Amino acid sequence: MQKITLESLVEKAVSLLENGTVTSVLGWKKGEFDYDITPAVFESADELKKDFVWNDFCGANFSKYLVSKTCKSEGKILVFLKPCDTYSFNQLLTEHRFDREKVYAVGIPCEGMADINKVKEVVGDGISKIESNGDDLVVTTIYEDAPVKVTCKDVLAERCVNCKSKRHVAYDELLGEEGEVIASERFDEVERLEKMTPEERFAFWQNELSKCIRCNACRDVCPACTCEKCVFDNPNSGVENKAASNSFEEKMFHIIRAFHVAGRCTDCGECSRVCPQNIPLHLLNRKFIKDINEFYGEYQAGAEVGLRAPLVDYTLEDLEPGEVFDRRDNNA
Amino acid sequence: MQIKEYKPLIVAFCCNWCSYAGADLAGNNRLNYPAEVKIIRVPCSCRVNPMFILRAFQRGADGVIICGCHPGDCHYTSGNYYTRRRMALLFSMLDFLGIERERTRVEWVSAAEGAKFATTMNDFVEKVASLGENKRLEDLRCKR
């Protein structure tokens, strides 16, 4: 259940379009299903009134879209940012990836987004309609006559259960109320894995990563992955596509993907949201975040514009790579 | 039938200014280190992209060691400080994925430390040999 209403968002977008502040609006639009919400660009009030949606499935982080949208257009673009999106927004600004002058950012509060897979676990397949009703989602399926009620809290996405912040770190205008940074328990799962034996960890990751179909969705959606030329598009790498030759074959892709965003990942969780195979990719990113926090001091990417990322920095007293393990063994 | 004796394949990335000269000194002094160590000369230890390491493993290396100048002695002033951070994170990640941590190592070897180079390599090869073949990080697509 979202506190801010669809009407207030559309009203804000229409008024900004009509008074000429912005020329286009980056928002959400219904895809094939009610839960399949895709990002879309709106250019008129009519389009907004007809197609704009705001519900518990509007998880998409718009920050990355600003890179292509601001380099092409002349006018300003209105973007709606949830608290976690504002971190990516700041991180991209830090890296000079888009033009701040061409963006009008409206911060909107977020009560956490629903995970359609969790909904499906409760109601099963064949969902034809989902409506929000107070704290519940009313789900109609093609197999049942009566709609099923699901409490929003029970189907919150993992990243929202472990939400790190409800505070916006960047905006031009804020709708609704400002939240607080939350002391989340997001590293618990990483710690659980760390406590396993290497054999168990290998088995866990082999099981997860062998599901990978190399669709590259995690890379394409990641707000930190904005290189125009990507190493994974190299046809000479020998690993550019899936060949199903051994079951842990995509580890290089996943290690490198996580390493390329290490220190820049804001932990927005988009990678896990878009994964069609439901691989917990955020755990790899969180492992890097956790290590960086432990070794080089607390660091939250995107908390401010202009922060120096830990991997482009050093101190004379840094930990030696061999000491990492001694330290962990002593703690365990 | 002849049973082929298992010999590990070790890739050593050595920086041009310290460790490569250190390896040279070990050779000049007739210090033994295993022939399974294949040295790749890089301009600086920070030239080693984490992808190089994974690539070596994918193509069948059993262990990868990175040698550079001692912190503070880098020819380019600060290169090895970056290496230190990157490799600490990368090796921690490999451990997180369940890869044996003895397969990777960073060692600082100066141009005057021929003996240290030889003992380091002997020790590293012995450790890797005891782990056996690298099965967890290999990739059949990349093996020739």
Image (spheres, coloured by chain):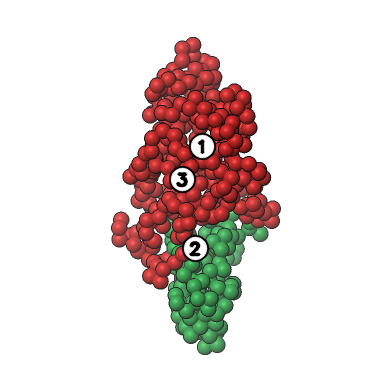
Q: Nearer the viewer, mark 3 or mark 2?
A: 3
Question: Can residue A254 be seen by looking at this rendering?
Answer: no
Task: For chain A, give the colour.
Answer: red
Residue situated furthest top in the rendering: A145
Instruction: From the top left corner, tell me how far across and down residue B19 is, in percent.
Output: 52, 78
Secondary structure beneath dot 2 equals helix
Identify residue type, mark 1: Phe
Specify whether disc 3 shares its chain with disc 2: yes
Determine the residue positioned at 45% across, 80% down. B116
Q: Nearer the viewer, residue B144 or A226?
A: A226
Identify residue for label 1: A80
Identify residue for label 2: A312
Secondary structure beneath dot 1 equals strand
Secondary structure beneath dot 3 equals loop
Mark identifier at residue A170 = 3
Tell me how far mark 3 sits from mark 2, CA to CA.
Answer: 24 Å
Residue situated furthest right in the rendering: A235
Determine the residue positioned at 58% across, 49% down. A99
